[in-house]
Image (cartoon, rainbow, N blue to C red):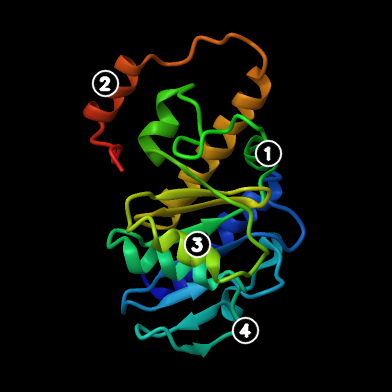
Amino acid sequence: MTETELREQICLLARSLFDRGLTHGSTGNISARTEDGGLLVSPTGTSFGRLDPGRLSRFDPDGTHIAGDPPTKEMPLHTAFYDTRSTAGAVVHLHSCHSVAWSMMPDADEDDFLPPLTPYAIMKLGRVKLLPFFLPGDPAMGAAVRGLAGKRSAVMLANHGPVVAGKDIEAACNAIEELEETARLAMLLRGVQANVLTPEQVRAVVTQFDVEWNA
């Protein structure tokens, strides 16, 4: 994929997320690796619904901002995933409603944020780590991701929003949508004795689809 095509794809997928209410206003940020090892990043203060391909922040392979508008203040989150996960080709961060709501539940599991409701979140995300609350833009968020040593592809920032790394921009967007939908199911089922996947069924999914799971 050429850089021009990647710029267009970033904006197309961001607009799709925005149009379906998965992030709102000027919330959320998105980035992707370029062929030369650099990054394209959504600029600070911009809306997913109105990203301009020509104004995306451009970083060279050394991490120097070389073109485009100033990047999102959440750059430490993005670079933490790229630096610790060699397979990361894109990172997406949203302020999606149901996942944020689920992060506020007193019984939310820090090591397994999403309950095992369907196989798809397991397949696309593995185990999701719930991180504590940080002020927006706090570099400590990136430090917390680095502390996971690349063992998780997805984290949930409490009272804030999910962050997901994928092999490319489409995979990252698909995975973060699955995270939000699973959280929505969890909220719908809260207080109900639902039939979740058994440990044996979870292990079968993990084995069949070669999911990172022991971290």
Label 3: few (<14), some (14–19) or many (≥20) C-alpha neighbours in 10 Å: some
Residue 8 visible here: no
Please report whichever mark, 2 or 1, sits nearer to the chain's N-terminal start: 1
Mark nearer the viewer, 2 or 3: 2
Please report whichever mark, 2 or 3, sits nearer to the chain's N-terminal start: 3
Residue located 71% across and 45% down the image: 21
Contact (CB < 8 A) between labels 4 and 2? no
Q: Residue beneath label 3, please? A: 9
Label 2: few (<14), some (14–19) or many (≥20) C-alpha neighbours in 10 Å: few
Query: Residue 212, position in %: x, y?
Result: 28, 41
Distance from disc 2 to disc 3, alpha carbons, whole Å, reads 34 Å
> For the residue marked with disc 2, what is the amino acid?
Ala
Residue 212 visible here: yes
- The correct choice, above or below, for 55 with respect to 198 in the image is below
Query: Residue 208, position in %: x, y?
Result: 23, 27
> For the residue marked with disc 4, what is the amino acid?
Asp
> For the residue marked with disc 3, what is the amino acid?
Gln
Determine whether the residue tagged by mark 4 lies in a helix, strand or loop: loop
Mark nearer the viewer, 2 or 1: 1
Please report whichever mark, 4 or 2, sits nearer to the chain's N-terminal start: 4
- The correct choice, above or below, for 119 with respect to 143 in the image is above
Is residue 145 toward the left or the right of residue 149 in the image?
Answer: right
Residue 35 vs residue 172, the one in the foreground: 172
Please report whichever mark, 4 or 3, sits nearer to the chain's N-terminal start: 3
Determine whether the residue tagged by mark 2 lies in a helix, strand or loop: helix
Q: Residue beneath label 1, please? A: 104
Q: Residue beneath label 4, please? A: 69
Residue 171's label in the rendered image is none
